Image (cartoon, rainbow, N blue to C red):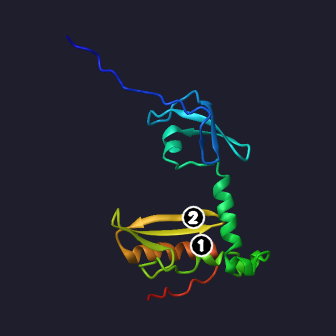
Amino acid sequence: MNHPKQHSSRLIDLTGKRFGRLVVIKKAPSSAKNGNARWLCRCDCGNQIIVDSQSLRRKSTRSCGCLRREINHQRMLNNKVFDKYQGNASSLKDGHGVFYSSIRKTKRNHTGVIGVSYDSHYHRYVARLRFHGKYVLNKTSNNLEEAIQMRLAAEQKYFKRQVQQVHFN
């Protein structure tokens, strides 16, 4: 005798439970793409959001986003460099309005070229450039030199200035 397969979908009622700053109000009408139940939650700040049950139980979602904003705000306040230049946004940009953070080589940079990194997962070089808060360049190449040339071309196009020779370590 064949019995149809039964799914053991046991819905755990999270109504009224607290997860960080979120309190579950009720089950949302639709499920997440992964099949998990979604819940309407009210954040301590007053916002309402819909959250996947797995995100709630694993504590990967603890607020509507207000917690992250508060943490970032505190980091800025405790950052001595930011404190030095607070209220003077022009000092955080070069003469062309480009933020210094986008044209400085970081400690994590292993290629020696600003805006060019190596993606070890895909085994390719990635050339990136953000301009006015948007990626205007986000391309990959098998070749480091080609990735460098893509970055330099984007700098010339968007920074509207003479790009200096790339300096290696």
Q: Residue at x 49, y 31 (%)?
A: 12
Nearest to viewer (mark 1 / mark 2) = 2
- The location of residue 121, given as percent across then percent down, is 35, 63
Q: Please, which residue is most extreme toward the left here?
A: 1
Q: Secondary structure at mark 1?
A: helix
Q: Residue at x 70, y 76 (%)?
A: 82
User: Relative to 91, is 29 on the left or the right?
Assistant: left
Rendered image quadrant of residue 103: bottom right
Earlier in the chain: of badge 1 and badge 2, it is 2
User: Relative to 58, is 159 on the left or the right?
Assistant: right
Q: Please, which residue is most extreme toward the right here?
A: 87
- Looking at the picture, tell me which residue is in the foreground, 101 or 60: 60
Is 59 rendered above or below residue 114? Answer: above
Q: Please, which residue is most extreme toward the front here?
A: 17
Q: Which mark is residue 136?
A: 2
Is 75 rendered above or below residue 27? Answer: below
The amino acid type, in three-letter code, at marker 2 is Val
Q: What residue is pinned by disc 1?
A: 157
Is 63 rendered above or below residue 81? Answer: above
- The location of residue 88, given as percent across then percent down, is 78, 77
Q: Which mark is residue 140?
A: none
User: Relative to 16, is 142 on the left or the right?
Assistant: left
- The location of residue 153, given as percent across then percent down, is 52, 74
- The location of residue 111, given as percent across then percent down, is 42, 79
Q: Secondary structure at mark 2?
A: strand
The amino acid type, in three-letter code, at marker 1 is Lys
> Is there CB contact under 8 Å for labels 1 and 2?
yes
Is 38 rendered above or below residue 112? Answer: above
Rendered image quadrant of residue 136: bottom right
User: Relative to 121, is 30 on the left or the right?
Assistant: right
The Cα–Cα distance between marks 1 and 2, rounded to whole angstroms, is 10 Å
| Residue 91 appears anywhere in the view | yes
